[in-house]
Image (spheres, coloured by chain):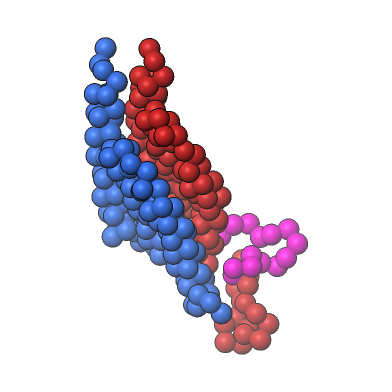
Amino acid sequence: MIAAADLLNIALMVTFVTLALGQILSMVRLVIGPTPADRILALDTMVINALGLVVLLGIYQGVQIYFEVALLIAMLGFVSTVALARFILRGDIIE
Amino acid sequence: MSFEIIGTYAVALLLLIGAGFVIVGVIGLLKFNDPMTRLHAPTKVGTVGIGALLLASMLYSFVQGEGSLHEMLIMAFLFVTAPISAHFIAKVSIHMRTCETPPAPPQDTTWSTLDVAEEDREIAPQEQG
């Protein structure tokens, strides 16, 4: 049976690689995405994956300070997604 | 088996579950072939994946002995806002007519995002659909 700390390290590395791969794949959709909705969705996914990477960094270093970073990324990501969608829907963000 | 060891195993398991969900969502975003189908993969599956990662972070802080439930705030915010942004992206898809137009609503004449205001009908005639 593997020691718990080793297993945690392996799981952290696997998750880091998986999320980075996810960022690259959604960047592919961002570039080829035929419609504006696809591009907004790809950007939204990338923001949420970046939030996951920041949380992972917090676990890896064993510190709590990345909590504020993750919260700010979550809020700004939502606001920017809504702003992009509204710009396409109405041609203006704040009417 | 102390709490630290079981907790560390649980953190590793949650991390792997989260990574699996996230990668499935992103593969769905890349592989599906219709804008509305692509919409549902990352907004639902990806959110669950990030929820598992946040749960792992919370559990790890308890394993380290300085427990905090801060990440619950991010989780609540994310779970509330993900459907809202998905709704907006779906409206963009309907508005740009990049998806099959949904069936007409039961009471109004057309969907509100396709509706043209009364005074603008001359410059942008409304399509019936």
Task: Name the quadrant of the N terminus of chain A.
Answer: top left
Q: Residue at x 34, y 27 (%)?
A: B12
Q: Is residue A37 left or right of residue A17?
A: right
Residue B109, magenta (yes or no): yes
Q: Residue at x 26, y 45 (%)?
A: A20
- Percent x, y for residue A28? 27, 54
Chain identity for the colour red used in the image: B
Magenta highlight range: B100-114
Q: Residue at x 60, y 81 (%)?
A: B125
Magenta span: predominant SS is loop
Q: Is residue B110 left or right of residue A23?
A: right
- Percent x, y for residue B48? 46, 39
Q: Residue furthest right?
A: B107
- Percent x, y for residue A3? 26, 17
Chain identity for the colour blue used in the image: A
Name the image quarter holding residue A16: top left
Q: Does residue B43 lie above or below B124 as drawn?
A: above
Q: Does residue A87 lie above or below B7 as drawn?
A: below
Q: Residue at x 62, y 85 (%)?
A: B120
Residue A3, magenta (yes or no): no
